């Protein structure tokens, strides 16, 4: 057996089983979901194998003629998800940017430790971190106790089960996602350029806008995309902190599967989320490649 | 001035990250059974209750003892996490080795492809797997949880091991071959020890993420297979009890230890 032949066999040995596994159990399910999204829901759950375009139409508000009128309620939930995900990106950017800047100016030893501290909560159970925010935000929680204790308000304010709680929770959970790409580009900032800008008479704000911001833009875009993707389809954070009041697309998909039992419609909704995510991934890869070249 | 403001902000940033977690830990020692948000003294009772030890919690609060379910959930979680992480580590490492050490046309394609399971929103993957298992007539069980989690954990191991392989000097492997070692010997004596920290790190990462997975497990677990995160989620839905603080604190301790070990191995990679 010659060497080239042996190498090919080794390669097949390494790739074969994992590739087959992913084809069957990752791409297979996604394909079946695509098929389901074009089928008719069965009356008692499950599906009838009859083609239907209504599932996608319903998302846009077209009525399922049997028992609905035109109502873009699903579209509005999708738009709300987009809005909350975008808000999450903006707040986590505002929260992380100055912190990343601060940490990038530390001595190397302290810097590594600070980055370790920022990434550590990522490994702490998600449900535990969200539970902590329930304790803080609920009517008898710490925030309301503090506000009432200082006399700022006499009645507890309803923080929990609002858009605010959901955005706050997602920001908290996704900080490492935003922080690391940001830090990566802030760390590369050339201090000599900042000094040159100041020497040439630029104000601090001018230096920030004309030098710092353009140089760290790749990190801002990368972090934004990586934060937006999990925020858009999120379902645990709105379930725990948004309750029944703040529905996001993820909750809607869950309902179609576990209570409404309309699998084709749920599949169509999931396809929409997946498409949005894949488009963003392609954009991200393109930008990263251009940035690297 | 600006520098001072920035430092002050930085400290606030860390308070924001750690205060909520710290709060849970502190209040897990709160003796107040009526209102868990009001501090009324130090106690180990919530921990004693978890471990089934006698406590001084009065019956007026009538907490249903759910220790048995908690233990079952922990057992399921550990079984799933161990199986999944080992499985994902074997497959992820094999893929990483193939892509890094062999020249073939699809190598670049694989590298991009392995990103997809990591960024796929978990709710999409969760329902896709549910439809799939039901359609092919596979009963939902621990096995379907393990399969479901493996689909995306393979990618995490792949990325971790690939990073280690990229940093690993191929000339050492070439030297080994030049000195007459067979490919198998080179792999066992040179490559494998070289990338071992990456494999171990990938395994730990997969273990932690598996222990914490909520969404995929929620859809493919079926009835009767409750993992720890799902158990806690259920407790939260039924109403908040001080006991959750103590469970959360123990979980925190567990993950921080494992994450600490994992991050230690990752930092060794770069040195």
Image: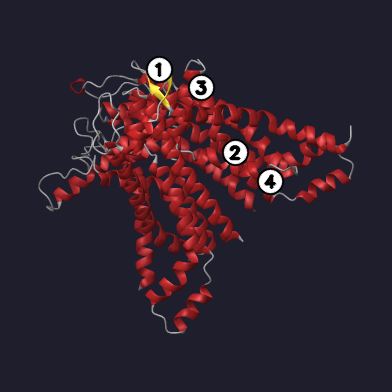
Q: On what subunit does the disc labeled 2 rest?
A: B
Q: On what subunit does the disc labeled 3 rest?
A: B
Q: On what subunit does the disc labeled 4 rest?
A: B
The residue identified by callout 3 is: B144
Q: CA distance from mark 2 to mark 1?
A: 29 Å
Q: On what subunit does the disc labeled 1 rest?
A: B
Element type where label 3 sits in the image: helix
Are dots 1 and 4 in contact, CB under 8 Å? no
The residue identified by callout 2 is: B157
Residue A277 pos. (x, y %): 46, 43
Is B98 left or right of A52, judged from the image as shown? right
The residue identified by callout 4 is: B165
Element type where label 1 sits in the image: loop
Of the image marks 4 and 2, the number of the one nearer the N terminus: 2
Q: Is residue A290 above or below residue B226?
A: below
Q: Is residue A74 visible?
A: yes
Of the image marks 1 and 4, the number of the one nearer the N terminus: 4
Q: Are the residues under badges 1 and 3 in a single subunit?
A: yes
Q: Are the residues under badges 2 and 1 in a single subunit?
A: yes
Q: Locate the N terminus of chain A by quadrant.
A: top right
Q: CA distance from mark 4 to mark 2?
A: 12 Å
Crowdedness near tag 4: few (<14), some (14–19) or many (≥20) residues, C-alpha within 10 Å: many
Q: Nearer the viewer, mark 3 or mark 2?
A: 3
Are dots 4 and 3 in contact, CB under 8 Å? no
The residue identified by callout 1 is: B223
Q: CA distance from mark 3 to mark 2?
A: 20 Å
Element type where label 4 sits in the image: helix
Of the image marks 3 and 2, the number of the one nearer the N terminus: 3
Q: Are the residues under badges 4 and 2 in a single subunit?
A: yes
Are dots 4 and 2 in contact, CB under 8 Å? no
Residue A257 pos. (x, y %): 37, 25
């Amino acid at each position: 057996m010659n060497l080239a032949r042996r190498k090919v066999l080794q390669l097949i040995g390494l790739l074969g089983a994992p590739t087959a596994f992913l084809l069957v159990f990752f791409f297979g399910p996604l394909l079946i979901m695509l098929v389901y999204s074009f089928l008719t829901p069965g009356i008692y759950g499950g599906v009838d194998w009859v083609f239907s375009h209504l599932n996608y139409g319903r998302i846009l508000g077209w009525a399922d003629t049997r028992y609905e009128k035109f109502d873009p309620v699903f579209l509005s939930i999708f738009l709300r998800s987009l809005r909350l995900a975008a808000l999450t990106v903006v707040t986590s950017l505002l929260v992380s940017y100055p912190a990343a800047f601060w940490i990038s100016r530390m001595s190397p030893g302290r810097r590594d430790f600070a980055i370790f501290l920022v990434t550590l909560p990522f490994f702490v159970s998600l449900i535990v971190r969200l539970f902590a925010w329930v304790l803080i935000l609920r009517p008898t929680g710490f925030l309301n106790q503090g506000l009432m204790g200082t006399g700022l308000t006499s009645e507890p304010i309803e923080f929990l089960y609002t858009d605010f709680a959901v955005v706050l929770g997602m920001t908290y959970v996704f900080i490492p996602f935003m922080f690391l790409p940001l830090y990566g580009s802030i760390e590369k900032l050339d201090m000599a350029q900042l000094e040159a800008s100041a020497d040439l008479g630029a104000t601090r704000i001018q230096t920030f806008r004309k030098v710092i911001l353009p140089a760290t833009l790749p990190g801002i875009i990368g972090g934004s995309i990586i934060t937006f993707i999990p925020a858009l389809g999120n379902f645990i954070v709105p379930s725990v902190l948004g309750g029944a009041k703040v529905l996001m697309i993820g909750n809607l998909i869950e309902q179609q599967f576990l209570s409404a039992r309309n699998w084709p419609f749920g599949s169509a909704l999931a396809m929409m989320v997946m498409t949005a995510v894949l488009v963003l991934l392609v954009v991200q890869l393109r930008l990263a490649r251009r940035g690297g070249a | 001035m600006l520098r001072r403001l920035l430092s002050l902000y930085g400290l606030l940033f860390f308070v924001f990250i750690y205060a909520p977690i710290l709060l849970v830990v502190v209040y897990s020692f709160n003796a107040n059974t009526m209102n868990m948000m009001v501090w009324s003294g130090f106690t180990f009772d919530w921990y004693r209750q978890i471990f089934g030890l006698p406590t001084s919690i009065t019956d007026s609060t009538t907490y249903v003892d759910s220790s048995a379910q908690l233990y079952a959930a922990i057992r399921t979680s550990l079984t799933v996490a161990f199986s999944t992480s080992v499985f994902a580590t074997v497959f992820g490492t094999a893929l990483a080795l193939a892509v890094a050490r062999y020249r073939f046309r699809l190598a670049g394609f694989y590298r991009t492809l392995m990103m997809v399971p990591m960024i796929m929103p978990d709710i999409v993957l969760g329902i896709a797997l549910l439809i799939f298992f039901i359609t092919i007539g596979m009963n939902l069980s621990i096995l379907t949880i393990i399969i479901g989690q493996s689909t995306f954990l393979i990618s995490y191991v792949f990325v971790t091991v690939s990073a280690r392989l990229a940093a690993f000097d191929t000339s050492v492997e070439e030297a080994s071959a030049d000195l007459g070692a067979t490919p198998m010997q080179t792999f066992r004596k040179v490559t494998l020890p070289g990338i071992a920290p990456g494999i171990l790190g990938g395994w730990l990462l997969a273990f932690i993420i598996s222990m914490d997975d909520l969404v995929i497990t929620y859809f493919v677990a079926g009835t009767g297979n409750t993992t720890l995160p799902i158990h806690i989620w259920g407790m939260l839905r039924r109403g908040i009890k001080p006991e959750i603080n103590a469970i959360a604190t123990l979980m925190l301790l567990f993950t921080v230890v494992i994450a600490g070990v994992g991050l230690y191995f990752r930092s060794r990679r770069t040195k």
